Image (tube, helix red, strand yellow):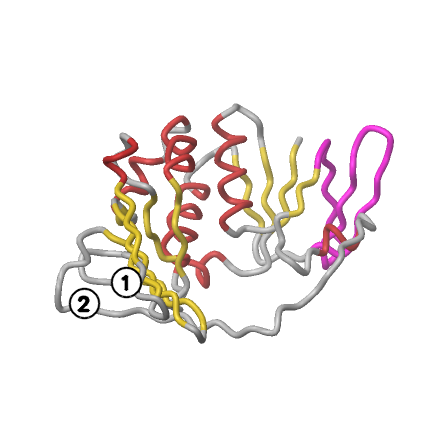
Amino acid sequence: PILIVGGGHAGLLLALMLDHAGLPVTVIEAKPPEAILAAPFDGRALALMCGSRRVLDSLGLWPLLEDIAEPVQGVRVRDQGTGATVAYDAAEVGEPAFAYGIANRALRRRLLELALARAGITFLAPAHLIGLERRADRVVATLAGGAQLTARLIVGADGRGSVVRLLARIDARRWSYPQTAITFALRLARPHDHCVHELLRPAGPLALLPLARDLC
């Protein structure tokens, strides 16, 4: 009954949640699965907050992700202009960790592996949505090549240039920030002690997020 367009973090996690609830779901993804599974490390990472861990725990997914997630138990911030510092520790609020550092590639690959193993999830890739028709009781999605799929609900999880949003004629306001960000990975000679280190600099912030025992 449910069609998800986009096989990134959001689309795959939603598919796994719906499967957990016993609902059949189809995911349409532009990239072939083998390309996603073989994607090289590109420096991008994210922090899964402890609330996200609780959600994943409730779905039985956290034990399947824990080995690729590095706990963040503290945050150390220093303002280089004034010398002021502030420190946060998860133990002070009764949590084992504030968050878990994880590489984008590793999370998407693991979510895809889990989705491909679920009988209730149909994964169509590479596939491209080119048409969308709303009817009284369903939506009809047309794929490149002419195939059509019907669903009670379609979810656009296909990013900032969402084809679903365009075809559904949902407006979006856009603006840009005159800023540039650089992301990269560092191998460490000394332990990170499960802490995020953030330097507030006049030219912009620099933050180090633990991703593995010797990687930020």
Q: Is residue 1 left or right of residue 14?
A: right
For this orientation, the residue located farthest to the front is 82
Q: Which residue is mark 2?
A: 188
Q: Which mark is residue 216?
A: 1
Q: Are marks 1 and 2 in contact (CB under 8 Å)?
A: yes
Task: Identify which amino acid the numbered label 2 is placed on.
Answer: Leu
Whole-percent x, y for residue 189 in the image: 13, 69
Q: Is residue 66 magenta?
A: no
For this orientation, the residue located farthest to the top is 22
Magenta residues span 129-153
Residue pictured at 30% horizontal, 65% vertical: 83
For this orientation, the residue located farthest to the right is 136
* Circle 2: element type: loop
Q: Is residue 149 magenta?
A: yes
- Residue nearer the viewer, 113 or 174: 174
Residue pictured at 54% horizontal, 51% vertical: 7
Q: Is residue 112 left or right of residue 135?
A: left
